[in-house]
Image (cartoon, grey):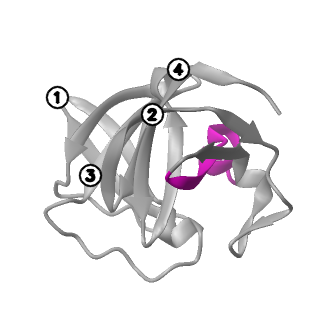
Amino acid sequence: MQAVDQIQYVEFGIADENYAILISDIHEIIRMQDITEIPNSHRYVQGVINLRGKIVPVISLRSLFSLDPDSVTKSTRIIVVNHREESVGIIVDKVRKVTAFSDIQPPPERVGGINGAYFVGIGITSAGLTGILKLDEVLIRE
């Protein structure tokens, strides 16, 4: 559909699937840390962390995508993204690499049982397919 070699993404894994976020949307990637729960929040909101004096909400893509609960390992990371003037942490199983896609195709209505609205597109590389997340859909839930 479109050549996008110059645009870089951070590719990460959740379960056995690969996902990516635009590198320009990422503030930093940190190791897993203690999360303070917030009562009466959505099931995918894990709570908040204190990131150098700033309170940052943290969500679980596993919960949002209705996968098995998070199990923290040495590879678990929190990707802190800048979205609409706010920082939000996203728990991922592992960060894989910075990559560029030779081709990005529109997402189907469902991607492996997950609503296609969560994706900007599907990035194609020689290693396989990667779902590129649409932060507006992932982070802004009613």
Name which of mark 4 and mark 1 comes first in the sequence. 1
Q: Residue furthest top?
A: 6
| Disc 4 residue type (three-letter) | Glu
Residue range in magenta is: 127-142
Q: Residue furthest front?
A: 126
- Tell me if mark 4 has few (under 14), some (14-19) or many (20+) residues whose alpha carbon lies within 10 angstroms of its own: few
Q: Nearer the viewer, mark 1 or mark 2?
A: 2
Q: Which mark is residue 122?
A: none
Name the spot of residue 124 as percent of width and height, x first: 63, 45
Write the residue at 57% across / 66% down: 64
Judging by the rendered image, the residue that carries numbered circle 3 is 77
Element type at mark 3: strand
Q: In whole angstroms, how far apart are the C-alphas of marks 1 and 3?
A: 17 Å
Q: Is residue 26 left or right of residue 4?
A: left
Q: Earlier in the sequence, mark 2 or mark 4?
A: 4
The residue tagged 4 is 85
Q: For residue 26, what is the image quadrant?
A: top left
Do the residues under discs 1 and 2 have CB atoms within 8 angstroms?
no
Q: Is residue 12 visible?
A: yes
Task: Say which of marks 4 and 3 sits in front.
Answer: 3
Residue type, numbered disc 1: Arg
x then y, percent, for residue 73: 18, 69
The residue under label 1 is: 52
